[in-house]
Amino acid sequence: MKIFVQFVSSLICSVIFGLVGFTNGANFGGNYGFPRFGGGVGWESGGMFFMIIGISLGSLIGITIVRKLLKEKLKFKIAAITMLIVICIQIVAFYNGMPQLAIVGIGMLLIPPVALTVATNRG
């Protein structure tokens, strides 16, 4: 049950931080410019780039909150390394892939919570 709670918390925080990242990234990209990323330029690329970062950081924060509430120790080195790897994979996949597909969008949202839940709950 605790793993499910960690996953759900991680997913909820991912959505919230992803929306915040998209909004701020689109604002930054639209006002100051952002290089081509994932088929867009300006606010489109800035929003998507910072959404990817926000989703990953939100996942980490969601897991951290639940583990603190349950008074369990978080293996922060493993979690941080997992998040860096996930961010790199998502950026490469989005940059080289087809961002229009719904599968890619769902994968972008589900990969960080799943990876972090598995990495932090390994024996």
Image: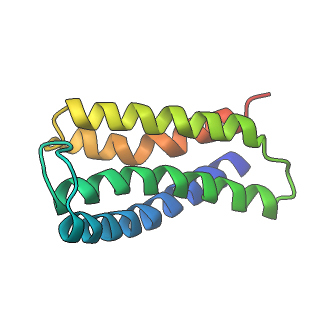
Residue 60 in the image: state x and y as whole percent.
Answer: 61, 51
Q: To which quarter of the image does residue 43 belong?
A: bottom left
Q: To which quarter of the image does residue 103 belong?
A: top left
Residue at 79% x, 46% y is 74
Residue at 40% x, 31% y is 89
Of residues 82 and 34, the one nearer the viewer is 34
Q: Using residue 40 as the reference point, say whether residue 84 is left or right of it.
A: right
Question: Can the viewer see residue 1 in this picture?
Answer: no
Q: To which quarter of the image does residue 26 belong?
A: bottom left
Quadrant where the C terminus is found in the figure = top right
Residue 28 in the image: state x and y as whole percent.
Answer: 29, 68
Of residues 60 and 38, the one nearer the viewer is 38
Residue at 21% x, 29% y is 96
Q: Using residue 55 as the reference point, say whether residue 27 is left or right of it.
A: left
Residue 72 in the image: state x and y as whole percent.
Answer: 85, 51
Residue at 59% x, 59% y is 9
The tally of labels here is 0
Of residues 113 and 8, the one nearer the viewer is 113
Q: Is residue 63 above or below residue 93?
A: below
Question: Can the viewer see residue 67 in this picture?
Answer: yes
Q: Using residue 43 as the reference point, say whether residue 16 is left or right of it.
A: right
| Colour scheme employed for the rendering of this structure | rainbow
Residue 111 in the image: state x and y as whole percent.
Answer: 45, 39
Q: Is residue 62 above or below residue 113?
A: below
